[in-house]
Image (cartoon, helix red, strand yellow):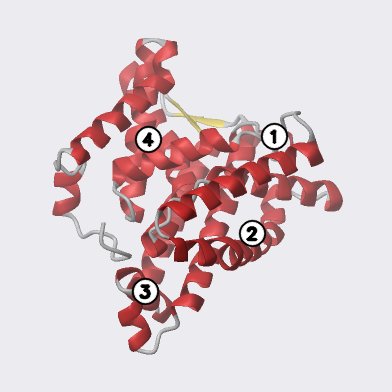
Amino acid sequence: MIWINQILQGILLGGYYALIAAGLSFLFGVMRVINLAHGSLAVLAAFLLLVIDHWLGISPFVGLLLMLPAMALVGVVFQLGVLERSLRGGVLIPLLATFGVSLLLDNILFALFGANTRSFASHIGTLSYGSWAINRSIDISQLDALIFATALGLLGGMHLLLTRSQLGRMIRATAIDADAAALSGIDPRRVRVAAAAMAMMMVGIAGAALGMRSSFEPYAGGAQLIYAFEAVVIGGTGSLWGTLIGGIVLGIAQNVGATINPHLSQISGHVVFLLVLVLRMRGAGGLLGDLRRKIRRQPMAPT
């Protein structure tokens, strides 16, 4: 029964990893950019929500209505000021540029807020520790279940947007071939700006989840970037539903490793990531390659 519990808890943890990885996967699918500032932007979103809560004294859930538009604006500025310019310099320049943005954000947040850790746990009442008892051995965290449901809703919403809307078709066309999309009347620059704004709103939701389920501080972005990157690679770069699968695999690996030995929690997730990476380098398509070939892949971009 303990193994069933650990697998179930790993699935729920995978919902958070999928949530933190969604924006990274989406931005890569549209622009082929690995955003090394992704984790720092999630922490920035958490601090924005903290400031809104401090100034207005409202619930973090209500504060999301103000924080998400602010993050969309951050996405627009990030795209026009950093990504649009750096993409002209080849593959390496965007990596260096986003890494520089990450360092800048971390140090600005440290200068403004100091090194103390923060959390929204005290602002969300019993949701931070409440659970549902399935039986004597299995309890499901209400917050983890909410985060998992949010991840499903977000990925499902993005899937519908990409497959059923005019904007989604424009995003997919731009991701596949921007030059051909331009010849058909699409403005790739505007599409990328819209995609960056949506990606930052996803990051904003992930930042809120980070602050609710654990604590955060100005230099917490590095760890979040690692989790997001590993979930994206395991599930398949550019695939939103693959990101969910990757997050679940990562979460289960960490929980099973922790059951064997508490010191193996993080290491086991990294080992799974490295195994998938080695298989991809050998052309095997990763642990989920066969599964992903059997299901219809996310039509955002070729992966």
Residue 23 seen in the figure: no
Q: Earlier in the sequence, mark 1 or mark 4?
A: 4
- In contact (CB < 8 Å): disc 1 and disc 4: no
Q: Can you identify the residue that label 1 sits on?
A: 119
Q: Position of residue 34 (x, y in %)?
A: 43, 51
Q: Mark on residue 174?
A: 3
Q: Secondary structure at mark 2?
A: helix
- In contact (CB < 8 Å): disc 4 and disc 2: no
Q: Nearer the viewer, mark 3 or mark 4?
A: 3
Q: Nearer the viewer, mark 2 or mark 3?
A: 3
Residue 116 located left or right of residue 35? right
Q: CA distance from mark 4 to mark 2?
A: 28 Å
- In contact (CB < 8 Å): disc 2 and disc 3: no
Q: Position of residue 81 (x, y in %)?
A: 61, 65
| Amino acid at the residue labelled 3 | Thr
Q: Can you identify the residue that label 2 sits on?
A: 71
- In contact (CB < 8 Å): disc 3 and disc 4: no
Q: Nearer the viewer, mark 3 or mark 1?
A: 3
| Amino acid at the residue labelled 1 | Ser
Work out whether 150 lies above or below 124: below
Q: Mark on residue 11?
A: 4
Q: CA distance from mark 1 to mark 2?
A: 19 Å
Quadrant of the rendering where the N terminus is positioned: top left
Q: Quadrant of residue 185?
A: bottom left
Q: Nearer the viewer, mark 4 or mark 2?
A: 2
| Amino acid at the residue labelled 2 | Met
| Amino acid at the residue labelled 4 | Ile
Dot 2 alpha-carbon crowd within 10 angstroms: few under 14, some 14 to 19, many 20 or more:
many
